[in-house]
Image (spheres, rainbow, N blue to C red):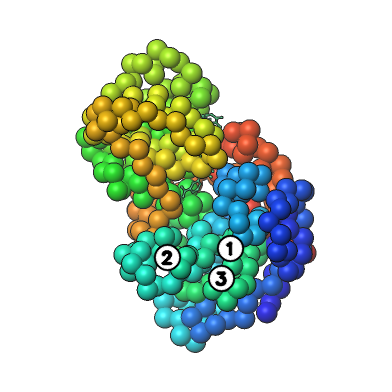
Amino acid sequence: MRCTAYAGRVPTTTPPSSSTLPDGPSRQGLIERRDLRPDDVRIAIAYAGICHSDIHTAREGVGAGAFPDHRRPRIAGRVTQVGEDVTRYAVGDRVGVGCIVDSCTECEPCKDGMEQFCLRPSVGTYNSRNYDGEWAMGGYSQEIVVTERMVLRIPDALGLDEAAPLLCAGITTYSPLKRWGAGPGRRVGVIGVGGLGHMAVKIAAAMGAQVVTLSRSMAKAEDARALGSSQHIATSDTEAMRAARGSFDLIINTVSADIPVEDYLRLLRPLGALVNVGLPTEAYSVKPFALVGGNKVLAGSMIGGMAQTQEMLDFCAEHGLGATIETIAAAEVDAAWERVVAGDVRYRVVIDTSTISA
Ligand code: NAP
């Protein structure tokens, strides 16, 4: 075991077994990382991204059931040590880790490249125990040890800071955009211009789609255009929403709160798809006719498999699509969470882990 400094809300070196939500002030301290196994890579984390999921988990219990750890994924850094069987990575390589740190490799989803849906199931980077029963400790820290199968290569064209959020916001939007055919001749709506939303806009535009942003107000209109949106609609503007009816092939909903789903289904063309990636806690209310009339699809999407995550990183590097970030010190994590909730971040916060003191 080796200790590494962390910044988060769980103050012990051994995580508690209770599933109470420890939404108190964050602390900095030490956690243990396992000794290197033959297939393990030790990574010095340079940057760790903050996502709204961190806050859902801590405050609303989304994904709870294991251990509500607050030290999150979306990690970018450099390899500092490799196990004797590691073949893909060497000391000094620029690498990242996303939302999962292990999967069984043998089940159908794993064999199909969808490790996130591993039937064993997959091991989350946080809020999860690994197959030996150890707690995964997330990424708000200076070091992590991960099997090489779960490590991504960060292309040289991407800064480590702007790459860290791609391991979540990038893949979570790239995957449904790819699956549902965003590209030339397709009109793609993105609801919510936040961490995920801003990457959905950049990626969809780079794929060649015509992108329209749907936001609570016009406040982000200028930014949205710079990100690649051809039109920005304030969802509070009933006339603009009416005018947009029946005009989208695909809509990606990245909103962290409940939305009136039927209002957005109305915006789809026949055969169009509304794909939800946001994770609010309330159930949808959708009358069957809202889908049946127009053969519409209401779908969901969760991160992406390892091969597709690497594909996304390579795509982003090729198109110069780093996340638009604000970098903070570890002591500013709590304030950053409040800013995420207030929708005040433009557009992703990353923690400079060199500022963690333990
Ligand atoms: P974020 O940065 O806070 O962005 C969410 C955006 O939603 C805001 O910027 C805002 O956009 C809009 N919004 C917020 N509150 C709203 C409200 N009450 N009504 C309408 N719109 C509202 O969050 P994020 O980090 O991008 O995460 C977005 C969601 O995706 C979260 O629920 C998160 O848990 C989830 N997520 C899912 C996956 C997955 O695998 N499916 C992965 C990561 C995250 P405007 O200001 O433009 O209106």
> What's under tag 2, amino acid-wise?
Leu
Which numbered disc covers residue 130?
3
The residue identified by callout 2 is: 119
Which of the two discs, 1 and 2, sits closer to the camera?
2
**Nearer the N terminus, badge 3 or badge 2?**
2
> What's under tag 1, amino acid-wise?
Ser
Local SS, label 2: loop
Question: In the depicted view, which residue is nearer to us: 351 or 55?
Answer: 55
Between the residue at mark 1 and the residue at mark 2, the CA separation in whole angstroms equals 15 Å
Callout 1–callout 3 Cβ contact below 8 Å: yes
Which of the two discs, 3 and 2, sits closer to the camera?
2
Left or right side of 343 for 255: left
- The residue sitting at 31% across, 64% down in the picture is 112
> What's under tag 3, amino acid-wise?
Asn
Between the residue at mark 1 and the residue at mark 3, the CA separation in whole angstroms equals 7 Å
Local SS, label 1: loop
Left or right side of 334 for 324: left
Give the image location of residue 83, x and y in percent: 52, 83
Label 2 near ligand 1 (CB < 8 Å): no
Callout 1–callout 2 Cβ contact below 8 Å: no
Local SS, label 3: loop
- The residue sitting at 59% across, 33% down in the picture is 343
Q: Residues within 10 Å of mark 3 (few under 14, many from 20)?
A: some
Q: Residues within 10 Å of mark 2 (few under 14, many from 20)?
A: some
The residue identified by callout 1 is: 128
Q: Quadrant of residue 187?
A: top left
Work out whether residue 347 can be spotted.
no
- The residue sitting at 58% across, 48% down in the picture is 62
